[in-house]
Image (cartoon, rainbow, N blue to C red):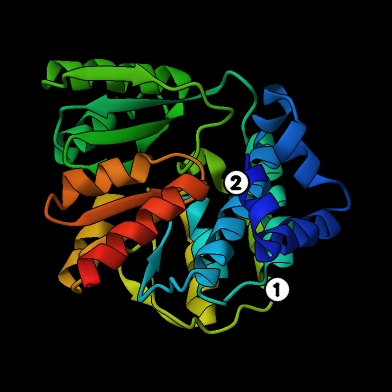
Amino acid sequence: MGKEVYDAFSSAREAFVQADDALGFSLSKLCFRGTEENLRLTWNTQPAILTVSVAILRALRDRGFYPNLVAGHSLGEYSALVCAGSLELPDAVRLVRKRGQYMQEAVPVGKGAMAAVLGLEPALVVEACAEASDIGIVSPANMNSADQTVIAGEAEAVRAACENAKRKGAKRVLPLSVSAPFHCELMAPARDRLAKDIHSLHFNNLSVPLVTNVDAVAIEDGASAQDALIRQVCSPVRWMESVQYLTTAGVDTFIEIGPGKVLCGLVKKIAPHARAFGVEGIKSMEALASTISNATM
């Protein structure tokens, strides 16, 4: 993961060097040669994805690509803040490693669960969760699109909410293999621990606006960025509204940076007329450069 851009761009190599130094171990070795089992540990996954994303971002900047606005889905909000100059990469890497640790420790294994509800409008998913709340904590965690909402909470309550969603007409309900129930109230212990770490850091004002997960509106000052990251831990990711906000602001081209192209698919669902490009390596970077160059000639 990330080895291709590491080999091709000195700016990308520097991102890995900074991450290795910040963490005190070779994250780059874990990314390039680590086992899948180790990479799946959330305290490793989060800094690894962040570092790879920033390495690709720096390579794109070498090619002349700079954003007008930024946004990130959950962990991606940290990458977006590094992109906007609010957070330095070493601080961000250390922060997300702690974030992963705190999230994993917040809920005993097996107590929490997450599931994707497909083909049911978000308002009905909210109802399905509310109707299961007498069993335990369950709520929307990712409001991804008009027909995809991820829910999270206590395992029994999540199962009950899934059954409610099916009765309300959901096309599919898919249990997710996750290490913890993210973006729900069960993460309160993680939020409180992370808040202390976030407040210990200096956040610069942003060089470009960030559309936050928690409010789906643009911010530009460091204090608001800190607040958004803290509230994000227990709040749903309002991705559909974030994309709608961006398109209303005139954005018609989205570039997803980092491993995978899930967000490109969601953008196309939310804003069918927008262009969405995923960049996770040299080939996709070249394809982006070629497409953008041809479109502007």
Q: Is 218 above or below relative to 170?
A: below
Compared across the picture, whether 259 is left or right of 236 comes to right
Q: Residue at x 67, y 66 (%)?
A: 11
Residue toward you, 102 or 111:
102
| The disc label shown at residue 66, or none | none
Dot 1: few (<14), some (14–19), or many (≥20) neighbours within 10 Å? Answer: some
Dot 2: few (<14), some (14–19), or many (≥20) neighbours within 10 Å? Answer: many
> Residue pushed farthest right?
24
Q: Residue at x 19, y 65 (%)?
A: 247
Q: Residue at x 15, y 34 (%)?
A: 124
Q: Amino acid at mark 2?
A: Ile
Residue 59 visible in the current orientation: yes
Residue 196 visible in the current orientation: no
Which residue is denoted by mark 1 in the rendering? 201
Picture quarter with the C terminus: bottom left
Residue toward you, 213 or 35:
35
| The disc label shown at residue 49, or none | 2
Label 1 element class: loop
Q: Which comes before the other along the chain, label 2 or label 1? A: 2
Quadrant hosting residue 69: bottom left
Label 2 element class: helix
Q: Amino acid at mark 1?
A: Leu
Quadrant hosting residue 194: bottom right
